[in-house]
Image (spheres, grey):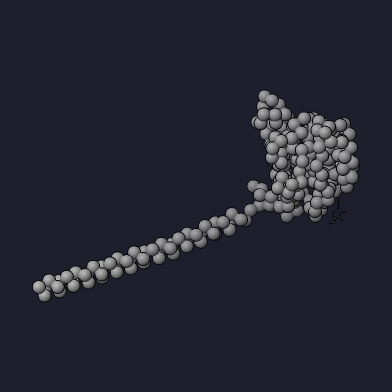
Amino acid sequence: MRLTVVLRGLAILFTLVTTWLFASTYFHQVSTKSVNLRSWLGSVDTQTKASKVRNKCGNRQSCPENTFSFKIVSGAANVVGPSLCLEDTVFMSAIKNNVDRGLNIALVNGTNGHVIKMGSFDMYSGDIKDLVTFLQDIKQGSLVLIASYDDPGTKLNDKAREMLTELGSNYAGKLGFRDSWVFLGGKGLKGKSPFEQYLKNNKDTNKYDGWPEMLEIEGCVPRKIG
Ligand SMILES: *[C@@H]1O[C@H](CO)[C@@H](O)[C@H](O)[C@H]1NC(C)=O
């Protein structure tokens, strides 16, 4: 009988010891895992930091010292507003709530990149005189960023088309009802701007029901244009 009690006691002790060993090993593993998890999170942090080294305006390339980074996105159909960005500053966008159907235009000082004036011009039911007055006031050495939204063309007249052409546009003469258009030009620019895209509203090729695809241009524009 006494031997049985001793053996039972040893068995209990054995169980306790192995449980403790198991538990300590297990918790040791858990704590190792939590360390690993932390270092894993740490590596995620590093990756996030690395991806934060992004180019201005979210562009694919970074720009040389003597240039401005820019990105211009047209509106998508009559649903998503356009956006105009220069040197990481979004001048106009749906989020900033300062875009409208028609032509969205930002005038920027070509030397320091500061915005001079912005405007949205309704080209479907607005007064074309508002756009002509806005374009007449542009000073030499200004950059002009333009994005279409919904309808950039219906109200355009010869005078306005000519003024946009003088800013370096290749397509201002053709711009019509519900075309997509993005453009960066300048007052005093000699020749045509390389920063422009245009898509005609054509029901056979339109991406959306009544509108062509939205357009986007980005790049580096030399400072002090013209
Ligand atoms: C641009 O800013 C400079 C000062 O940085 C000024 O001298 C120049 O007149 C401005 N140009 C325009 C077109 O506003």
Residue at the limit of the structure toward the front, as seen here: 1
The N terminus lies in which quarter of the figure? bottom left
Quadrant assignment for ligand 1: bottom right
Asked if residue 110 can be seen in this view, the reply is no
Question: Where is residue 203 shown, x and y percent of the image?
Answer: 69, 25
Residue positioned most to the top: 204
**56 vs 207, nearest the viewer:** 207
Residue at screen point 17% across, 70% down: 8
Image spot of residue 153 (x, y percent): 80, 32
Residue found at x 47% / y 59%: 40
Q: Position of residue 211 (x, y in %)?
A: 70, 31
* Residue 34 visible in rendering: yes
Residue drawn 71% across and 45% down? 94
Q: Between 14 and 48, which is closer to the camera in this rendering? A: 14
Which residue lies most toward the left here? 1
x and y, in percent, of residue 16 in the image:
25, 70
Up-down relation of residue 107 to residue 4 (above or below): above
Q: How many marks?
A: 0
Is residue 61 shown left or right of residue 97? left
Q: Name the residue nearer the viewer: 70 or 204.
A: 204
Residue under the point 71% across and 41% down: 81
Q: Is residue 108 above or below residue 46?
A: above
